[in-house]
Image (cartoon, coloured by chain):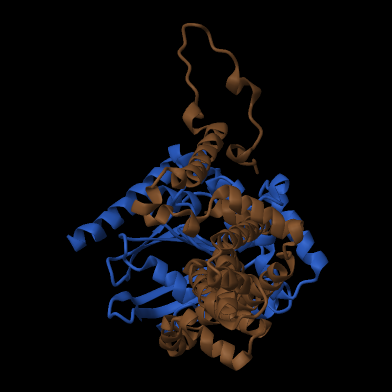
Amino acid sequence: MTSAQQRWLVRISDVSFTYPNGVQALSGVSLELAEGEVVSVIGPSGCGKSTLVSVLSGLRESTGSVVWNRDVLRELDGSGRRPFSVVFQRNTVMPWLNVEKNIAFGLRYLKLSRQDIRQRVNSLLETGGLVDFRRAYPHELSGGMERRVALLTGVATLPKLLILDEPFSALDEPTRVSLHRELLVLLREYGMSALLITHDLGEAVSLSNRVCVFSNRPARLSSVVDIKLPPDRDVEKIRATDEYQDGYRELWESLWQQINARV
Amino acid sequence: MATDQRASVATRPDEFAPTPDNEQTWSTTGEQSWTSSLPMIIAWRVLLVGGFLALWEWLPKVPNIAKHVVFLDPFFISSPSLIAKRLWQVVTGADGTPLIWPPFLFTVVTALIGTAIAIIIGTLGGLLLSNSATLERVLRPIIVALNAVPRIAMVPIVVLLAGSSSRSDIITAVTVVVFLVFYNALEGGRSVPPEMIDNAKVMGAGSWSIMRRVRLPLVLAWVSASIPNAIAFGLVGSVTTEIFSGAQGIGQLLGAAVDTADATLTFTVVVVLTIVGVTLVVGSNILQRRLLPWWNAHL
């Protein structure tokens, strides 16, 4: 599914996962992500989208395989970058750390020097517009800023793949769109791919190159919708375009089919 | 990228600009009733405590009342004025009264040492068990059983083993306080959201690092919430041991007062213990607010 110029980054092949209580969440899911790509996953509520994040990030063991491109891993070795990081839906910003310490949390494990950590955090604070809030604690931030801190914490390790598990679902529409724009800037600036788990069709269309539609639980890949919007899209203006409307309609039909299948 | 303006602490000056007469305005902060203002709250407190003391002082003086209500017999309950006078005497040594300071210091120091030891043991225990499901499954029933042992009933055994010394005070304070701190620490360690731990794991944190950098801050916050009670329990442990052991300390003084049916001295000692307890609790609360500003806002 990747173009000739793009190197594949991770291959998920025939992954299945069953919880200890016997509930099967994933059934033979296969997916490939390439460098520079933004892929979204949508599906009926509770179908197993977040389980895919756990499997992909190594938090749960599954059957099937998750293979990372060895060349990419070799390049990352000792570069102060991680292959992937995850931005979870909630509860990842640590209330006892201020903004800059939250962002720097994961950098300690990359064996970077103090100066490198400081430099990287400063650059991220600049990009994220949080310079004036570097010493603020999470309880002093708005919901949107707290999510921005979570996003920058995920980006801080400069992963090749940023996995986002419904990171903006609790936000109001304007804040969400503003963060969509910031996310695309970050992905471009730091050369990252993204896998976005979302239930928001507009979000999926706005941000992605392609969208994978999952079936009801146990989740299978039921269809893939290519989004024909340019990579340097302006998320605030694309909603009126035909490409956005077409993508949204196609996604809605695919998703509705899955929801009806359950009924 | 634009900064989210909603978090700005500065208030725009036009927010409170005067409005034309034809527009109705109302307070967005909610007008505070005068009955709930701070001076009124303080006045209510003074009235309640003053009223209680006045009743205590004057009610027993009603002719023949002690014959009908034994609790109002001044022989048993003394009076606030006598207690205040005795308090002055034991604090200053006036009229040749022995000073309260040596036993006072003995009790406070032993209680604080015992409490501090219990806080360290309880915190470490709670932290370790919250970080290891296996360890918790192994030790939990044993800890529950130990917690069910009435520690005060063990005081005579402690005194027999450790002798009539400060060691007995400290050991009792530790045994009384440790479980209180332990359970708080355990809950604190367990209260870490699973997403936070998953996030740390994904970033490369191992079990030790998760315990130190993710669980410990919340454990310390929960433990800090238990410190006022821990101090109060530590004092109870030390004083009770002194009553049993007859070792120097406030408890010994209290025992002597009870033995000689000296109600005034008994209440004087109780007042001193209350003042000590309140001072330590207020001090620990101030320290908590200074050291853990995020925790109070988090609540």
**Looking at this view, is B282 or A10 the one in front?**
B282
Seen at 51% across and 82% down, the residue is B129
Whether residue A212 is situated above or below residue A131 in the rendered picture = below
Q: Nearer the viewer, residue B65 or B212?
A: B65
Q: Residue furthest bottom?
A: B161
Residue B136: where, in percent of width, then height?
46, 84
> Image quadrant for the C terminus of chain A?
bottom left
Give the residue at x 38% y 47%: B64
Rendered location of residue A60, percent (x, y): 44, 79
Can residue A38 be seen here? The reply is yes
Q: Is residue A5 visible?
A: no
Q: What residue appears at the point 63 percent right and 50 percent down from the top-left corner?
A: B84
Residue extending farthest to the top is: B21
Tell me where residue A155 sits by quadrant: bottom right
Q: Residue at x 60, y 83 (%)?
A: B171
Colour of chain B, in one word, is brown
Q: Colour of chain A?
A: blue
Q: Is residue B287 left or right of residue A263?
A: right
